[in-house]
Image: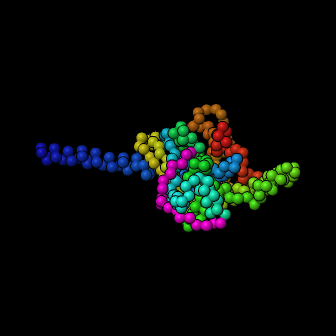
Amino acid sequence: MLIVLWQICTAIVFDAVAVGLIFHRISRGASRSKSILFSDKAIVRYIRGVPHFMFRLGERRKYHLIEATVRCYCIRHERIPKHPSHRSSIDDDVKYQTTNSNNNSQTHVETTYFVSRQMRLLQPDDRFGSHVWMGLPQVVVHRMDKVSPLRPTEPLWFDAQGISHQYPPPRPSDISDSAASIAEGDPLYIGSNNDVSSNVEDNSECIGDFLRDRDIELVVLVEGTDEGTGAATQARHSYKLCDVAFNHTFADCVHPYSCRERNGPSSLDPVVSIDFSKFHDISRLSTEEIDCDSCAYIPEHQN
């Protein structure tokens, strides 16, 4: 009887361990996170003269994550210029920086490597928790404003060699010439598409040099709850400067379903079709679209 009792207890323990291991293997978050898609390339697009960082996020499973949230972090080097101690006033500091900018001289720079900075999200809005619905591919947008870690500080930023760079970069035309042109009513001075395109390209090149000097890397975290198992799932992805395309846009991958019946249950009446073969595709913007007034990826009241 003792042998039979020992055998029963052993079988119960074995069944419990086996079922637990199998369930843990099936519901493991690492396997679930593989179904979350991140676009191969991130883009930087100008809207009303302000650059915006964007990437696409998607879900390949039919049952998507519940209460999914998105967070973005910028990992970069921080460089702080150390000016001579005899300059005490603010006016002297401005004159000193202007002189360095014009003469391209070197300044002693203190560098702190790999500092983490959280990025504010415009879409989905981080004021409401950065929740995103994973049923459709979504474009995550970060505005590169003055407080963004992806944008150089104004009016000067310093590289690793202590050389100062001006941002925004100086324009070929002088301010006095432009004022004279406006006073004379010269219609040719009015900004054309070529002028806007040239300015955007110069700004993009300056931002690219800044991000390259800071050895930038962007880490994206997506967290949510799996509908089937109730387990918390986290997916991670990172973008380096080589993964960022300036002045591009994403190709359309969501289209209305061509054979809608509008009758019967919704499971038999699909609304949209998602072409995942175009999920990672991007295209370069034309000269007329390189700096737009609004963008479909951003809510109308935030454009």
Instruction: Give x and y (percent) for residue 98.
Output: 64, 59
Q: Residue at x 67, y 39 (%)?
A: 300
Query: Does residue 8 appear left or right of residue 42 in this picture?
Result: left
Q: Observer-nearest residue: 279 or 92? A: 92
Q: Residue at x 43, y 52 (%)?
A: 30
Q: Is residue 110 magenta?
A: yes
Instruction: Give x and y (percent) for residue 147.
Output: 57, 48
What is the span of residues highlighted in magenta in the rendered image?
A: 103-121
Query: Does residue 85 appear left or right of residue 292 in this picture?
Result: left
Q: Observer-nearest residue: 270 or 223? A: 223
Q: Residue at x 64, y 45 (%)?
A: 297
| Quarter of the rendering occupied by the N terminus | top left
Instruction: Give x and y (percent) for residue 168.
Output: 67, 56
Residue extending farthest to the left is 1
Instruction: Give x and y (percent) for residue 220.
Output: 51, 51
| Quarter of the rendering occupied by the C terminus | top right
Q: Compared to 254, does 242 lie above or below?
A: below
Q: Observer-nearest residue: 141 or 198? A: 198
Determine if residue 268 is in view. Answer: yes
Q: Observer-nearest residue: 158 or 2? A: 158
Determine if residue 242 is in view. Answer: no
Q: Could you say which quadrant of the image residue 172 lies in?
A: bottom right
